Amino acid sequence: MVINIQLGKEENTKVGMVINIHYPKHPCASSGYIKEHRLIMEKKLNRYLNKNEHVHHIDYNKTNNKINNLIVLSNSDHMKLVGNLYSLFPELIKDGIIKFDKRKKRYYYEK
């Protein structure tokens, strides 16, 4: 399998916070586009990902598609990982690392 990440690179579009690449020949392309992070992981693995595989952004920045920021997980393992992250919130709030602004109705942290 040959995956050319540069194919259509000039036509990058952002849909939400995910970078899409115009790659109409990809078997999982939707309207001719594929998520860049999936292409990068497929190139590393030298195979197509299946629909039950999730590419997780370790730093939660979905535009940071550097290979050292990506990990492939099953959908169930990804849900466990997200649950693990959410389980940390009460401790971070208790320790004063994350705070809540009632006026703005949002959580924040002070650097």
Image (tube, rainbow, N blue to C red):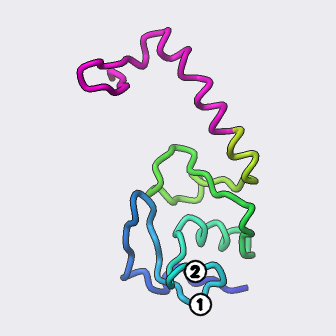
Question: In the orientation shown, which residue stands out farthest toward the left?
Answer: 103
Number of residues whose C-alpha sits closer than 10 Å to that of mark 2, classed few (under 14), some (14–19) or many (20 or more): some
Is residue 32 found left or right of 109 in the rendered image?
A: right
Q: Secondary structure at mark 2?
A: loop
Q: Residue at x 75, y 47 (%)?
A: 76
Give coordinates of residue 37: x percent, y percent.
55, 64
Residue wearing tag 1: 25
Residue wearing tag 2: 29
The quarter holding residue 101 reads: top left
Q: Is residue 57 above or below residue 21?
A: above
Q: Is residue 47 above or below residue 68?
A: below
CB contact under 8 Å: marks 2 and 1: yes
Question: In the orientation shown, which residue stands out farthest toward the bottom?
Answer: 25
Q: Nearer the viewer, residue 4 or 19?
A: 19
Magenta-span inclusion, residue 72: no
Is residue 107 found left or right of 45 in the rendered image?
A: left
Residue type at mark 2: give it: Ala
The quarter holding residue 58 reads: top right
Give coordinates of residue 83: x percent, y percent.
65, 33
Q: Residue at x 25, y 26 (%)?
A: 104
The quarter holding residue 43 reads: bottom right
Is residue 51 found left or right of 92 in the rendered image?
A: right
Q: Residue at x 50, y 9 (%)?
A: 94
Which residue range is magenta in the image?
A: 81-110
Residue type at mark 1: give it: Lys
Number of residues whose C-alpha sits closer than 10 Å to that of mark 1, classed few (under 14), some (14–19) or many (20 or more): few
Q: Is residue 30 above or below residue 55?
A: below
Q: Secondary structure at mark 1?
A: loop
Q: Nearer the viewer, residue 66 or 74?
A: 74
